[in-house]
């Protein structure tokens, strides 16, 4: 009965690889988000989707591409991974379209 | 753009005492201010929020106050307990330009038994 679930929880990969993180919510929320939390714990929005439509697209490298096949899923694909991409990535959702109310458990990405 | 400053960055209080965390924001049109708690290794959790049409909101031991004129808001935790130890984030909803939530830098709160 997990509300917002993301997989995998841990991801260790080499520089230059391409990887994906999946996120699903069963709350019936209309909006989903991706946040990046760096080593200093700073939380920064990357993308948000409302009913499969892109709402926010922050200044992130275009190596990051979100995909929302339906309003319950928002996946994040990252091409040509770099050392600086190492962080915890959180998926989140909300009924409204401006701020997250429920976060996923996070995916700790380590690029070596 | 919107800037949210949060202080202090670390806070240590004795169990049973009160803790106060303060935030200031720059976008005077901001109208929604949530607070999140993140325990070590866990996900952020929304614990309380306040909208700009009220000055204070309480939920058991936690309360949030908002001063729109001064553009600052605060989180108050009374009768602190060890399980209150966590990183707390304030946030403000930026209205001007693309509407999005901007987070403060976080406060690591430690409750000493």
Image (cartoon, helix red, strand yellow):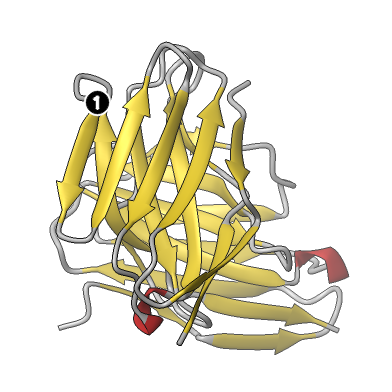
Q: Nearer the viewer, residue B59 or A2?
A: B59
Tell me which corner region of the image, top left, top right, bottom left or bottom right, holds residue A93.
bottom left
The residue marked by circle 1 belongs to what chain? B
| Quadrant (top left, top right, bottom left, bottom right) of the N terminus of chain B | top right
Q: Is residue A10 visible?
A: yes
Q: Residue at x 49, y 49 (%)?
A: B21
Q: Residue at x 34, y 73 (%)?
A: B16
Percent across and percent down for residue A48 are: 43, 44
Percent across and percent down for residue A53 are: 35, 38
Q: Is residue B108 above or below residue A66?
A: below
Q: Residue at x 13, y 57 (%)?
A: A28
| Quadrant (top left, top right, bottom left, bottom right) of the C terminus of chain B | bottom left
Percent across and percent down for residue B60 are: 15, 59
Q: Is residue B111 above or below residue A74?
A: below
Q: How many marks?
A: 1
Which residue does the numbered mark 1 point to in the structure image? B55
């Amino acid at each position: 009965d997990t509300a917002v679930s993301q997989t995998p929880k841990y991801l260790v990969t080499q520089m230059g690889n391409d990887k994906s993180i999946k996120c699903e919510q069963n709350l019936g929320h209309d909006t989903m988000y991706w946040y990046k939390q760096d080593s200093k714990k700073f939380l920064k929005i990357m993308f948000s989707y409302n009913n499969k439509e892109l709402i926010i697209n922050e200044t992130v490298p275009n190596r990051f591409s979100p995909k929302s096949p339906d309003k319950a899923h928002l996946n994040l694909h990252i091409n040509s991974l770099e050392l600086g991409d190492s962080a915890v990535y959180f998926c989140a959702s909300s009924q409204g379209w401006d701020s997250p109310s429920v976060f996923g458990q996070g995916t700790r990405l380590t690029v070596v | 753009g919107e800037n949210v400053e949060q202080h202090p960055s670390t806070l240590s209080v004795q169990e049973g005492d009160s803790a106060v965390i303060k935030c200031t924001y720059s976008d005077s049109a901001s109208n929604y201010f949530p607070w999140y708690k993140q325990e070590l290794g866990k996900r952020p959790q929304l614990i309380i929020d306040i909208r700009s049409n009220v000055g204070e909101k309480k939920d058991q031991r936690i309360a949030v106050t908002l001063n729109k004129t001064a553009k600052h808001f605060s989180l108050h935790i009374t009768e602190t307990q060890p399980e209150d130890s966590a990183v707390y984030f304030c946030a403000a909803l930026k209205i001007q330009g693309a509407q999005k939530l901007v987070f403060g830098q976080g406060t690591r709160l430690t409750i000493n038994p």
